[in-house]
Amino acid sequence: MAVLIVGILFLVMGLFAGAVLVLAPLGMAHLEPNAVLWLLFPFFTLVGYGLCAANARDSIRPLTLGASWTLLVLAVAAAIAILLDATGVRAANGTLSLWFVLGVAGLAGTMGAAAFARRR
C-alpha cells in the first residue's frame, strides 16, 4: 500500500511539473520553470507510473489509465501551443519546453493507453 501511495504522489508531482512546462511559455502560469523541473517531469511521471503499475490489480487500472489520458492531454496541449507559436502567437520563453513535453508525455501516454487496449 505504501508503494502505491508514493507512486500516486510521484505521478501527481510529475503531471504538475509537465503542466507548468506547458503553461509557463504561454504566460498562463506565473511560474518559471528551470532545468530541475525539466528533469523532474519525466522522472516523477515515469517512476510514479511504474510504482502504480507495480501494484497492478484491477482496482489500479482506472488510475493508470487516467494518468495515460492526462499525459496525452498534456501532449495535445503542447502541440496546440507549438501550432499557435508557429502561426504568430508567440510563446514567452520559446517552445523548447513544449517540444519536450510533447515528446515525453506523448510517448508515455501512448504506451500507457496502448497497454490497456482491448484485445480480441
Image (spheres, rainbow, N blue to C red):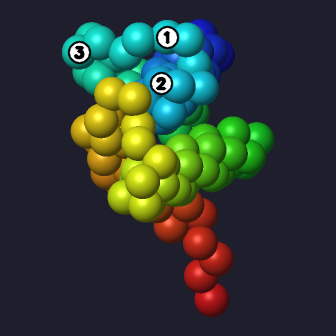
Camera-nearest label, 3 or 1: 1
Q: Position of residue 41 (x, y in %)?
A: 38, 26
* Residue 30 visible here: yes
Q: Residue at x 49, y 11 (%)?
A: 31
Left or right of residue 115: residue 119 = right
Q: Residue at x 62, y 44 (%)?
A: 70
Indicate whether 109 appears above or below 19. Answer: below
Nearest the viewer among 76 and 119 is 76
How far separated are the C-alphas under marks 3 and 1? Answer: 13 Å
Point out the tag, 3 or 2, that comes first from the N-terminus: 2
Q: Position of residue 61 (x, y in %)?
A: 68, 47
> Is disc 2 placed on a helix, strand or loop?
helix
Q: Residue at x 29, y 12 (%)?
A: 34
Indicate whether 13 appears above or below 116. Answer: above
Question: Disc 2 marks which residue?
Answer: 24
Q: What quarter of the picture does the C terminus occupy? A: bottom right
How busy is the neighbourhood of tag 2: few (under 14 within 10 Å), some, or many (20 plus)? some
How far separated are the C-alphas under marks 3 and 2? Answer: 13 Å
Question: Disc 3 marks which residue?
Answer: 35
Q: Are marks 3 and 1 in contact (CB under 8 Å)?
A: no
Circle number at residue 31: 1
Left or right of residue 98: residue 109 = right
Camera-nearest label, 3 or 2: 2
Which of the 4 image quarters holds residue 9? top right
